[in-house]
Amino acid sequence: MDVLADFCNHKVEEYFTEPPLGLEFDNPIRMYAIFWLILAVLGVISYFVASGATYLVIYVLFPKQLLAEEDKVINKGQIAREILVSVRGIPVIATITAPFYMLHWMGYGELYYDFNDRSIGYFIISLIWFLAFTDCLIYWIHWGLHIEPLYTWLHSTHHSFLSPTPWAAIAFNPFDGWAQALPYHIFTFLFPFNNWAYLIMFAFVQLWTISIHDRVSFTSLDGIVNGSAHHAGHHFYYRYNFGQYFTLWDRLNGTHRPWDFPKSRTCGIVSDKQIPPTEMLKEE
């Protein structure tokens, strides 16, 4: 990300004859503003492009091939609200995420920029370790967000979408989204990680988050990989299926539940199988 910020900073230098607002090339305030703009602009563009493309393919072009009948039902006004929550949150998330990139720009952390600094074997292993490390931390952060009062304060916004669409992928309270993204940034301060891999994984995470909200699951309903069916169970049952990429930590912690109640999910019908969020910690 700081490579992209450095590119933008040079463009600012070329465009303005005088430093904007008197902020010189290496001024921290100027760099923070650049990081904020990159995060906010890329956040909006990637959200509308990726979520929009997914919605177009699944819900407009090929719904008969990809969706069960009950999954074609979308509540009135739901998509508009998903988009509104998402767009409102992006500037805030950019504000509280930019400091991580500022720290890298200032020389802190374990990012490396030259592929020759590490072997190709290490590069591949670091990607796998990134997924394993972040999957573990996100599980426990997500699990913690279901404990009161954190659930009501933060996470309930996302769970207001009982049967989400691709547009709900980042429809979070921004501090909730920031908390669940923390492991991605923590990783780069603990382990050597290639700068471009960091950027690639940033994009991958966005696409993965969309995929587990799109109602189309290409994985087993009871497999090791977390698909949209597994995550649908989380939205419907609340206290199960907290994992991000895999079901490992759900299985180890007794919170794994295969999705087995499809028709009530999409239509938002409350059944005796559904656990209200206020009751999720009471059931044994």
Image (spheres, rainbow, N blue to C red):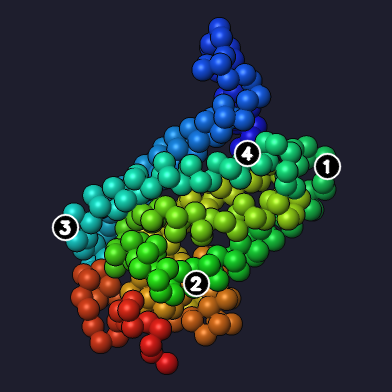
- Left or right: 280 as drawn, with respect to 128: left
Check the image and report above or below for 102 versus 56. above
Q: First in sequence: mark 4 or mark 3?
A: 3
- Left or right: 92 as drawn, with respect to 131: left
Q: CA distance from mark 1 to mark 4?
A: 22 Å
Question: Which of labels 4 and 3 is toward the front?
Answer: 4
> What amino acid is found at the position of numbered circle 2 in the picture?
Gly
For image coordinates 54% across by 74% down, the residue present is 247
Q: First in sequence: mark 2 or mark 3?
A: 3
Residue with the mark numbered 1: 117
State the image coordinates of residue 77 (x, y, percent, origin top left): 18, 54
Q: First in sequence: mark 2 or mark 4?
A: 4
Q: Which mark is residue 149?
A: none
Label 4 element class? helix
Query: Is residue 46 among the parts visible in the rendering?
Result: no
Residue with the mark numbered 3: 76
State the image coordinates of residue 43 (x, y, percent, origin top left): 45, 41
> What amino acid is found at the position of numbered circle 1 in the picture?
Asp
> What amino acid is found at the position of numbered circle 4 in the picture?
Met
Q: Which mark is residue 102?
A: 4
Q: CA distance from mark 4 to mark 3?
A: 41 Å
Q: CA distance from mark 1 to mark 2?
A: 38 Å
State the image coordinates of residue 5 (x, y, percent, origin top left): 60, 30
For image coordinates 44% across by 59% down, the residue present is 176
> What amino acid is found at the position of numbered circle 3 in the picture?
Lys
Q: Which mark is residue 144?
A: 2
Check the image and report above or below for 45 versus 25. below
The answer to whether marks 4 and 3 mark residues whose Cβ atoms lie closer than 8 Å is no
- Left or right: 2 as drawn, with respect to 94: right
Q: CA distance from mark 2 to mark 4?
A: 28 Å
